[in-house]
Image (tube, rainbow, N blue to C red):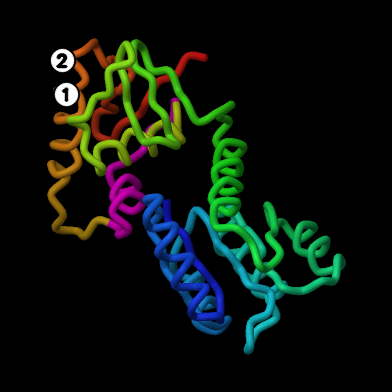
Amino acid sequence: MNVLIIEDEKALARELEIFLTNYNYICEVCYDGASASERVAVNLYDFILIDLGLPDYEGLDLLKEAKRSNPDAAYIILTARAEIYDRIKGLDMGADDYLAKPFSLLELQSRMQAITRRKFGLKNNVVELGDFLVNLTERTITHNNDNIAAITKKEFDLVAYLILNKNRTVTRNQLSEHIWGSIINDDYDSNYIDAHIKNIRKKLNTYAPADWLETVRGLGYKIRINH
């Protein structure tokens, strides 16, 4: 998932980027409000982390601005401000959560997972797909307690993103943007994603049918979950 980190403390911003990248988020960093304003105007993000104490921008104004261009993003306010008013104001303006500095990186990641579950209607981080169990936290796919180690990182990312959008068709363009961090170019060979899906099916079908992973002809793919 794509994350925009807006934080003027460069050491903290770098720490956040490294930490979240290790959890397989695709991160971009802005150290000031002006550059962040430009990014949110042209790019779409799944998460936007906003420091309220930016040197050149009022953080709450930036939140309001970002909400207009990225209405579907999840927003977490990062603040060293003690005033409860700023936190309440941010939540009233549509922020999903806030963390007071200093905060635990593990707590941030846990809150991001909780927001993701709420947003996509998941009860927990373990999803049953036919005869398979997908653990979104541990990033594993198992069959009868056997871990399917042959699934690569990118293949798991594809399955996880389709789970988050369960019962909805996800186009190849959307898969490319959210998994690889870039929009497909006009000369892009769509067989690249098709090859990944083919490999996933081949590996899973060795254990049991993966008929819950469906091809939507001419559009993309979806994972069907009936419960």
The reply to whether dot 1 and dot 2 touch (C-beta < 8 Å) is yes
**Which class describes the residues within 10 Å of circle 1: few (<14), some (14-19), or many (20+)?**
some
Percent coordinates x, y for residue 183 in the rendering: 30, 58
Percent coordinates x, y for residue 130 in the rendering: 36, 12
Task: Please name the residue that numbered disc 2 is placed on.
Answer: 206
Task: Please name the residue that numbered disc 1 is placed on.
Answer: 203
Residue 170 lies in magenta, yes or no? yes
Specify the segment rendered in magenta: 167-183
- Choose top left, top right, bottom left or bottom right for residue 88: bottom right
- 47 horizontally vs 207: left or right: right
Where 160 sits versus 97, above or below? above
* Residue 155 badge: none
Percent coordinates x, y for residue 113 in the rendering: 54, 43
Seen from this angle, which residue lies furthest bottom? 56
Q: How far apart are marks 1 and 2 (CA)?
A: 6 Å
Q: Which residue is drawn at 68% across and 74% down?
A: 52
Q: Which residue is drawn at 65% across and 84% down?
A: 57
Please tell me which residue lies in front, 59 or 110: 110
User: Does dot 2 land on a helix, a strand or a loop?
Assistant: loop
Where 57 sits versus 140, above or below? below
Residue 3 lies in magenta, yes or no? no
User: Does dot 1 land on a helix, a strand or a loop?
Assistant: helix
**Kind of residue at disc 2:** Thr
Please tell me which residue lies in front, 17 or 104: 104
Please tell me which residue lies in front, 110 or 123: 110
Where 213 sits versus 189, above or below? above
Percent coordinates x, y for residue 159 in the rendering: 33, 33
**Kind of residue at disc 1:** Lys
- 84 horizontally vs 133: left or right: right
**Which class describes the residues within 10 Å of circle 2: few (<14), some (14-19), or many (20+)?**
few
Q: Residue at x 43, y 31 (%)?
A: 168
